[in-house]
Image: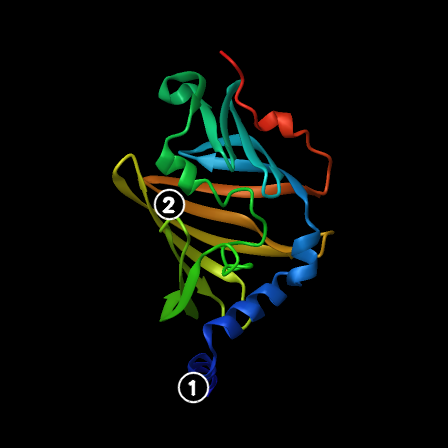
């Protein structure tokens, strides 16, 4: 009976009805709009190693992630104008500008609320794409394409309307890149925003688990931290 009811519910909803329920589930437009900055302290588990990570986000202005491994900093930074990175593990010890493809892929990193929040205003399109099972849950599947033609497939729990899984497809340096993330540990934060505190991502053969330990909202962040240091 529950399965039949769920199926009828899915058939009867438009894409915008589903999206509106998702936005309300994660705190609503007001709570999302009030977030101007975020600073997130996380533990990153990759290839059996536990790393410390700090992410600074100034909404619509900049994103910077610093992950520390054996005293070495791996940095990734994006702004509306581009971005830069430092990755000694890949032989890059000085700040290097991101490519145009990387700029497009990183254009949503300083956006709060996810790809469905104000998607039309962002120049994206969204459509219902049937259903698929994620960890035994028959999800609502949505396909979103942004203004840079980057395609994201979201799998929503039909009961909570939280995103359980996300598939992202884009192009980096001429190569198609597909990334899959599973979200869990949803919690309501002090800001009223509901967020997943655990993300498991599979990207180009790497399995990465990110666990948020602390999130601060509307903390003052100096925009200068997003500027690429001069060599």
Placement of 89 over or under 31, stated as above or below: above
Residue that appears at 42% across and 46% down: 201
How crowded is the residue under tag 1: few (<14 C-alpha within 10 Å), some, or many (20+)? few
All told, the count of numbered labels is 2
Q: Earlier in the sequence, mark 1 or mark 2?
A: 1
Question: Residue 119 appears at what percent x and percent y?
Answer: 50, 59
Pointer 1 and pointer 2: residues touching (CB < 8 Å)?
Answer: no
How crowded is the residue under tag 2: few (<14 C-alpha within 10 Å), some, or many (20+)? some
Question: Residue 159 appears at what percent x and percent y?
Answer: 54, 73
Q: Residue furthest top?
A: 231
> Would residue 137 be seen by someone viewing this image from the given angle?
no
Dot 2 falls on a residue whose secondary structure is strand
Using the image, tell me which numbered label, if any, was put on residue 16: none
- Work out how far the residue at label 1 is from the one at label 2, CA to CA, in angstroms: 33 Å
Residue that appears at 43% across and 25% down: 97
Residue on which the image places disc 2: 202
Residue that appears at 45% across and 53% down: 182
Residue on which the image places disc 1: 4
Placement of 119 over or under 105, stated as above or below: below
Question: Residue 209 appears at what percent x and percent y?
Answer: 47, 42
Name the colouring of the figure.
rainbow
> Would residue 115 be seen by someone viewing this image from the given angle?
yes
Dot 1 falls on a residue whose secondary structure is helix
Placement of 190 over or under 130, stated as above or below: above
Residue that appears at 60% across and 53% down: 195
Question: Residue 187 appears at what percent x and percent y?
Answer: 64, 56
Q: Nearer the viewer, residue 159 or 20?
A: 20
Q: Is residue 53 left or right of residue 223?
A: left
């Amino acid at each position: 009976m529950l399965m039949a009811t769920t199926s009828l519910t899915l058939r009867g909803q438009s894409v915008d009805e589903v999206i509106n329920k998702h936005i309300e589930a994660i705190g609503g437009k007001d709570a999302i709009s009030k977030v101007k900055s975020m600073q997130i302290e996380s533990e990153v588990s990759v290839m059996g190693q536990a790393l410390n990570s700090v992410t600074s986000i100034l909404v619509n202005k900049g994103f910077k992630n610093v992950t520390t491994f054996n005293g070495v900093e791996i940095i990734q930074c994006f702004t509306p104008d581009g971005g830069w990175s430092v990755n000694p593990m890949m032989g890059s010890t000085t700040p290097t500008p991101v490519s145009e493809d990387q700029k497009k892929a990183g254009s949503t990193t300083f956006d709060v609320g996810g790809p469905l929040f104000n998607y039309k205003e962002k120049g994206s399109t969204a459509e219902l794409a049937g259903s698929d099972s994620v960890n035994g849950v028959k999800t609502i599947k949505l396909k979103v394409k942004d203004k840079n033609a980057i395609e994201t497939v979201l799998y929503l729990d039909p009961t909570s309307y939280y995103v359980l899984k996300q598939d992202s497809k884009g192009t980096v340096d001429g190569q198609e890149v597909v990334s899959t993330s599973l979200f869990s540990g949803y919690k309501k934060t002090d800001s009223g925003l509901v967020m997943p505190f655990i993300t498991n991502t599979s990207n180009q053969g790497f399995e990465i688990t990110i666990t948020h330990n602390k999130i601060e909202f509307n903390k003052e962040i100096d925009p200068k931290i997003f500027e690429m240091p001069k060599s």
